[in-house]
Amino acid sequence: MMKPLLFSFALSLALSIKAEAESSFEPWSYTDKDLYPGAIVSTATVDWNGEQQVAEDKRSKSLKLAKDELALFGDENGWLAVELIDIPKGTEIEVEVGIDGFLKPSKWKGTAKKHYPDARIFPEAAWDFTALLANRQPRPVTATYKVTLNGKLLGQETETYIMHSINDCPFYVLWDEKGKEYDDFSWLFAAYVNENHPIVDEILGEALQTGLVDEFSGYQSGDPDLVYEQIFAIWHVLQRRGIKYSDVSTTTPGRYVVSQSVRFLDDSIESSQANCADGSVLLASILQKIGINTYLAMVPGHCLLAFDDGDHNNAEVIGIETTKLGDADLTPVKGENQTPEGVSKKEFKASLRTFTHAIEEGEAQLEQYWKRFMRGRNPDIQLISILEARELGIMPIATD
C-alpha cells in the first residue's frame, strides 16, 4: 500500500504531467488584430460591472459561473488575454503579456480551484499611456504572450497587431460577418469631446467680444431663446475662425472593427478643417463647458450634433448640422475690430442664416431617425449622450 505522503507526491506529479501534456493556450484580443489607443486611454478607469465582479479570482458571492459560461480571471475590463485550454484543478498559473513600446510586461498569477475546460486570463495591463497618446498613425506592433504552469513554461507566442492612431475611434465590433451580432462602442466618441481643453475658454472669450451675449450661463435663465443666443455666439466665432468642412474620415480598416478618424479640437482649429464628426465634437466641447447637455447623433455615414434646449424633463432635443459651419466666408476673428460696422452687421446676418439652416437640417435628420435612435438596434444609428458617457466613466482624451 502506498504511503499517504508518497501518494500525494505521485498525484501532484501526475497532475503536473497532465497539465503539461494536455493544456494549451492562444493569444486573445477583444478587437482581434487591431488595437485602438483612444479606446484604451479613455476607458482606463472604467469598471463595466461596477460592484458585480465576474472574474473567478474576485467573483461577487451573489454570482455563480454558469455551466457553459467561460471562466474569466484577472482584469475583466482588459483588452488582451490568453485563452487557456484544459486547466486541471490545483494548477499554478502565471501569464505574462507585453508589447514593445506600448505595454510593459504585465503578469497574472493564481491557482485553478477546479478543473476548467477553458478560461480567459487578463493580466492587469501596464500601458504606457504617453506612448499611446503620441501614436498618430497606424503601425505594426509585436505582442508577446507567455504562460507558465506549475513553474514550467507551457509556451511563448507572439502576435502582430496594428496599433491604430489615437484619432481612430472604434464605432462597433462585429462578432459575425453578417453584422447581426456586435458590441456597440459608439460611446467612445464622447472621449473626443473635451470641455477641459484650453482652446474652449479662448473661443468663449472671443464670443463674448462679439457682443452677441453678455455671459455664458447655460440653462440658468430658463429661457430657450437665450440658450440659442449663446450657441449662435459660439457658432459665429467658429465661422470667423474659418472652419471649413473637410470630408476626411477614413481609417485603416480593421477586420471586425468599424472605426472613424476624429480630429482633436486644436487640430481642427489650427487646420481650419473639420469633417462631420470633428465639427460636432468641437461644438459639443464648447457647449458642455457652459453647461448645455449635448449629444453626438450618429446616422449612416454621418454625424451631427444635438443639444437639450433646457435642463427640465420636457426639454426638446435640437439638432445642428455642423457641416454648415463652412457655408459663410466671414472676416477672420482677429480683424473683426477693424471691420466697418455695416459690414459686421451684414456678416452677422450671413452667419445667422447658416445657423438657422444648420438647425433646420439637423432637426430634419433627428426627426427622420428618432424612432430608430430610441430602439437602438442599428449600430450605425446612435444618439450618444455626452453626460451619460461621462457618468459611465468615459473621460476626455487629453492631448497636451
Image: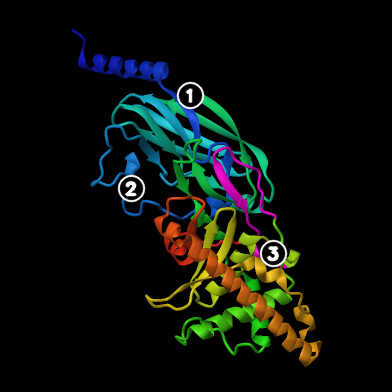
**Mark 1 in CB contact with mark 2 (< 8 angstroms):** no
Q: Which residues are magenta?
A: 248-269
Please tell me whether mark 1 or mark 2 is closer to you in this view: 2
Q: Amino acid at mark 2?
A: Gln
Residue 321 bears which disc, if any?
none
Q: Nearer the viewer, residue 15 or 267?
A: 267
Is 259 contained in the magenta span?
A: yes
**370 or 47: nearer the viewer:** 370
Give, as a three-letter code, the residue at label 1. Leu
Foreground: 97 or 387? 387
Q: Quick one: label 2 or label 3, which is nearer the N terminus?
A: 2
* Res. 153 mark: 1
Q: CA distance from mark 1 to mark 2?
A: 30 Å
Marks 2 and 3 in Cβ contact (< 8 Å): no
The image quadrant that residue 90 belongs to is top left
Q: Under tag 2, what secondary structure?
A: loop
Placement of the N terminus among the 4 image quadrants: top left
Residue underneath mark 3: 268
Residue marked by disc 2? 53
162 to the left or right of 60: right
